[in-house]
Image (tube, coloured by chain):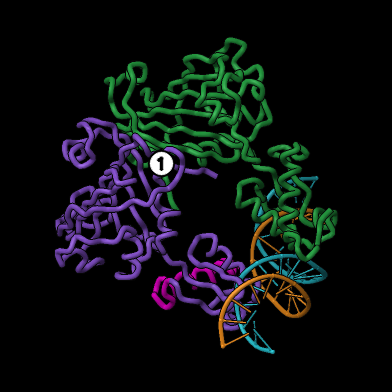
Chain colours: A purple, B green, C cyan, D orange
Amino acid sequence: MLSTDKGSISLYMQIKDLLVTRIGNGDWLPGSIIPSEVNLAQELGVSQGTVRKAITELVENNVLTRKQGRGTFVSTHDSQRSLFYFFHITDNQGHKVLPESRVLHCRHKQATRKEAAKLKLEVGTAVIRIERVRNFSAKPTMIETITLPADAFAGLGSDGKLELPNTLYELYEKQYGITIHSAEEQLRAVAASKHDAAMLHLDVGTPLLEIERVALTLDKKPVELRVSRCSTRNHHYQNVIF
Amino acid sequence: MLSTDKGSISLYMQIKDLLVTRIGNGDWLPGSIIPSEVNLAQELGVSQGTVRKAITELVENNVLTRKQGRGTFVSTHDSQRSLFYFFHITDNQGHKVLPESRVLHCRHKQATRKEAAKLKLEVGTAVIRIERVRNFSAKPTMIETITLPADAFAGLGSDGKLELPNTLYELYEKQYGITIHSAEEQLRAVAASKHDAAMLHLDVGTPLLEIERVALTLDKKPVELRVSRCSTRNHHYQNVIF
DNA sequence: AAGTGGTCTAGACCACGTA
DNA sequence: ACGTGGTCTAGACCACTTG
């Protein structure tokens, strides 16, 4: 199984890949505990230090979470984590605001060219398109269009209910076994359309911050396209560069 | 020097702090080699593994750079690194474009309220204010206002020359011994002013992406405020979230 | 008390760069 | 040939959590 040939990659890297594969397979579900370092070391025939190094890097990648005295767990997307990692809008004092959401509609459609390109689908593939308005401090501030491949999210929104949780990534994980692990965002300044203006109580043409996000699973598969248009009168997008 | 008391923090953390302090002091300049792991271990009376752990974390923080077979070096801000870490504008194909810059002026002024707040100075402190236009593919696309505390950057631009290198952070490091290590950015959508419009060949009111960046040294001291307004017709701000 | 991760040690061998 | 970092081992003790 593990190779110690000269030319092969290092042991801890092979173990890293193995752990990622097991998690991807669903052998270990998000939130569940994985075997202890000593057990894994025994099973794989390596020393604890080697397993430790593999786990350490996965913890740095937010794939695993260590809890002293308890064990190592597969990371989950509780609302805390979702907000901390993926939500970059703050008010002008730098405070994160928990947005409430109002779903405008949730429809089954066919993928546009752009959606198909971003989600790596064929044009015309069945998708679910959700539109919602997000309120910060009770004021409508952001309008979002979310596109999901229909096959991976079967049944979502088809019951006519427009109730969706605020933190969708938690839903994806719990209901559909899809864990969002990373995302790529493109930001632009755009002018508010008639529709934007109406929903956000602004004038047509007001500059809005457009955030186009593709969310990826652990194995880098794109599973959600989200286009958000946000008024930056009282809020902004906050980014920290190390 | 190092404490192994029960209540004290771990050895490798103390070593980390020590290394950071020495770099901050200027004992080891950017680009120079630091003592080998074995030497440091000997000097500090710990094992190589402990030093290694401290260095590993500093490498992850981009403070140090390891080169196999050669040694460990204090990170520098060559133009590569500056572009890779701090420059987030790409064209719509996702390619980074090396911008050229044209300096409009470079003046000694007094800090405004906003500049003072962002740079943690008193209002009215002497600052240097640089304004420049950046061209992507020969088209003016971005207009930047850069504010620096005058005392830390004595002499910059006072020779009346408007020639400044494209990658300012390299200049800060080489000429003034100030290494930019991290930055905080706030992004908003704004309408082009008359001046913006003239410089970027756009209509007044065109939505622009405003990037307000505070650049920090290793010890988190703010040393540069940079406000960039960017046309997002052919470009965008690209961010990756892990 | 037993089991977990967290830190630390001392040593081994390898891959790489320099001289 | 030598010194560097890169990987790996085997064992020790500590801090924390659970039964």
Q: Residue visible at 84% across and 59% down?
A: B45
Residue occupying image coordinates x 36% and y 23%: B139
- Compared to A154, does A206 lie above or below? above
Query: In the figure, residue A166 lies in which quadrant?
Result: bottom left
Tell me the element at label 1: strand
Say if A157 sits above or below A42 in the image: above
Which quarter of the picture shows residue B199? top left
Residue drawn at x 33%, y 16% is: B194
User: What type is the residue that disc 1 sits on?
Assistant: Asp
Q: Nearer the viewer, residue A188 or B67?
A: A188
Q: Position of residue B166 (x, y in %)?
A: 52, 26
Q: Main secondary structure of the magenta part?
A: helix
Q: Residue at x 34, y 29 (%)?
A: B190
Nearest the camera: A118 or A70? Answer: A70
Q: Position of residue B41 (x, y in %)?
A: 81, 57
Q: From this viewpoint, is residue A8 visible?
A: no
Residue B171 colored magenta? no
Q: Is residue B201 above or below residue A226?
A: above
Q: Which residue is mark 1?
A: A91
- Image-based side of B197 in relation to A57, left or right: left
Chain letter of the residue beneath label 1 in the structure image: A
Q: Is residue A60 left or right of residue A127?
A: right
Q: Is residue A6 left or right of residue B209?
A: right
Count up the numbered dots.
1
Q: Residue furthest top?
A: B160
Q: Is residue A54 visible?
A: yes
Quadrant that contains the C terminus of chain A: top right
- Residue B161 locus on image (x, y percent): 57, 12
Q: Residues within 10 Å of mark 1 (few under 14, many from 20)?
A: some
Magenta residues span A6-30
* Residue A222 percent location from the top left of the image: 32, 57
Question: In terms of depth relative to the viewer, which is nearer, D5 or A104?
Answer: A104
